[in-house]
Image: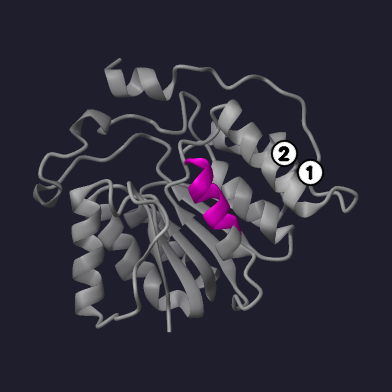
């Protein structure tokens, strides 16, 4: 196990009883704070508090169009849980991940991230670890679906079921996977929908994929940085 893996799995996710956080008796902002605190404390997400709150804000915006919430790169399911918390069974929520390990780099990645190649970010139980996160917080609604497989194998099959997409969150790290997700899913994002790129400021390959795609598609909407070390988003017009 390399240093990246030791940091990632330094704390075992505890076996915890199921809790209900979607009750109307609890103010939603209070429930959100508790959810985020629990996700971080139990190592159910690698995403920091700022990005989790930004995801909540994007998914709960009053002017957001109808449609599904889609995440590519689920890991242990923390962000999918936030999406499901907002959706409350009223919107479809989809999470796609190989649950088998980080794919190989390509030359566009310039070697950045090589220590993470092969690491199963979801944990040793893969899909089951992500499912346990949803179960833990009573967010495993029928409208929430986790799909196991490489993006190239799963997205073409499910793409028509996803549209329209209201929020598309890509946590796909490398050039090839980020570019593939954009090429496959962007046309299914509804006007007014939000695209979130988790690793834009973190990985060269991801940034290159996004910049090339936006240039190719003549996308001029501003990139809004939500985390200077990592994340950006833009709104489709």
Q: Quadrant of residue 223?
A: bottom left
Residue 44, percent from left and from top: 55, 32
- Quarter of the image where the C terminus is located: bottom left
- Mark 1 is surrounded, within 10 Å at the Cα level, by few (under 14), some (14 to 19) or many (20 or more) other residues, namely some
Disc 2 and disc 1 in contact, CB within 8 angstroms = yes
Residue 104, percent from left and from top: 20, 40
Q: Quadrant of residue 152?
A: bottom left
Q: Residue furthest front?
A: 228
Asked which secondary structure carries label 2, the reply is loop
Looking at the picture, does residue 65 appear above or below residue 171?
Answer: below
Asked which secondary structure carries label 1, the reply is loop
Residue 201, which numbered label?
A: none
Label 2 vs label 1, nearer the camera = 1
Q: Residue at x 74, y 59 (%)?
A: 89
Residue range highlighted in magenta:
48-56
- Quarter of the image where the N terminus is located: top left
Q: Circle 1 sits on which residue? A: 21
> Observer-nearest residue: 213 or 48?
48
Residue 137, which numbered label?
A: 2
Residue 159, percent from left and from top: 45, 68
Looking at the picture, does residue 192 appear above or below residue 122?
Answer: below
Q: Residue at x 49, y 49 (%)?
A: 51
Q: CA–CA distance between discs 2 and 1? A: 7 Å
Identify the coloring: one colour
- Mark 2 is surrounded, within 10 Å at the Cα level, by few (under 14), some (14 to 19) or many (20 or more) other residues, namely many
Q: Is residue 37 left or right of residue 44?
A: right
């Amino acid at each position: 196990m390399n240093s990246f893996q030791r940091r990632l799995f330094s704390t075992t996710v505890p076996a915890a009883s199921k809790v209900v956080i979607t009750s109307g008796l609890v103010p939603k902002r209070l429930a959100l704070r508790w959810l985020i605190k629990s996700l971080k404390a139990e190592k159910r997400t690698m995403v920091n508090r700022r990005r989790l709150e930004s995801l909540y804000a994007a998914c709960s915006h009053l002017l957001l169009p109808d449609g599904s919430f889609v995440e590519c790169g689920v890991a242990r399911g923390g962000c999918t849980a936030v999406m499901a918390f907002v959706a409350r069974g009223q919107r479809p929520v989809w999470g796609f991940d190989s649950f088998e390990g980080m794919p190989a780099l390509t030359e566009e990645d310039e070697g950045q991230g090589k220590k993470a190649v092969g690491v199963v970010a979801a944990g040793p139980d893969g899909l089951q670890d992500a499912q346990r996160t949803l179960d833990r917080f009573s967010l495993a609604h029928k409208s929430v679906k986790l799909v196991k497989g490489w993006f190239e194998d799963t997205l073409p099959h499910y793409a028509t079921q996803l549209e329209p997409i209201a929020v598309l969150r890509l946590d796909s790290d490398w050039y090839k996977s980020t570019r593939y997700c954009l090429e496959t899913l962007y046309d299914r994002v509804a006007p007014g929908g939000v695209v979130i790129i988790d690793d834009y400021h973190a990985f060269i390959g991801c940034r290159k994929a996004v910049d090339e795609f936006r240039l190719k598609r003549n996308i001029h909407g501003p990139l809004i940085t939500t985390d200077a070390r990592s994340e950006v988003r833009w709104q489709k017009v």
